[in-house]
Amino acid sequence: MSGMTRPRPRRAAAVAATAAAAAIVLSGCSSSGSSAGGDGQIGFVSAKGSNISKAAVGHRQDAPDLSGSTLEGTPVKLADYRGKVVVLNVWGSWCGPCRAEADDLQRVWDKYKDQGVQFLGINTRDPEITNAVRFEQERGVTYPSLYDPAGAQLLKFPKGSLNPQSVPTTIVVDRDGKLAARAVGGQLDDALESIIQPVLAEQQR
């Protein structure tokens, strides 16, 4: 009948709700972004005018139990890498700053992968997995990425922690599985190393 709309299936509604929630957690694709959420809280240090925040040892929150399938379909859990310093990078094939930082991430991964460091991407808001796979192939990305199109994994980060603030965001998890540092926006080699090296060094003392 004219004038009547067909009800949306429950599954579609649930997916839409999850996507909407993810949109609240993450602002739009940005090369800068705000580091709010960690700033001003005990144990958090954010350089003035910087998009990098760090949590002091003893003030770090547990990283969430991230798990799922990689873009290649391989099961993966963040907990699988306990004992290593893990670098999480939230990205999307549609994101300009993500494309700009991809080469730097790969170079840093190549430099540190044999030093007790594991990179793990979190691909988000890419409804077509083929776009994400093509992104990695074209840019020579060799570390794994969780496929998280609706942002369900991102919603697991505790509020008020060093959680993702935009796409892209890079987060360092220490060897004890705690959130140690966060860099919001696209990053270059030097900035990436500046949040990895201190965490790697403190675990070697």
Image (spheres, grey):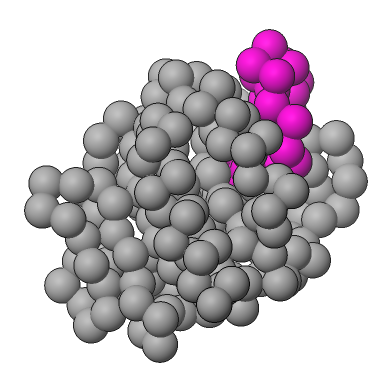
Residue 149 visible in the picture: no
Left or right of 43? Residue 200 is right
Q: Is 3 colored magenta in this rendering?
A: no
Task: State which quarter of the image contains the N terminus.
Answer: top right
Residue 70 visible in the picture: yes
Q: Position of residue 136 (x, y in %)?
A: 69, 23
Q: Which residues are magenta?
A: 121-146
For the point 29% across and 51% down, the residue is: 52
Q: Answer above or below: position of 180 versus 10.
A: below
Q: Position of residue 114 (x, y in %)?
A: 74, 48
The quadrant where residue 203 appears: bottom right
The quadrant where residue 153 appears: bottom right
| Residue furthest top as drawn | 138
Q: Closer to the camera, 99 or 10?
A: 99
Q: Closer to the camera, 64 or 193?
A: 193
Q: Position of residue 95 (x, y in %)?
A: 45, 24
| Residue furthest front as drawn | 205
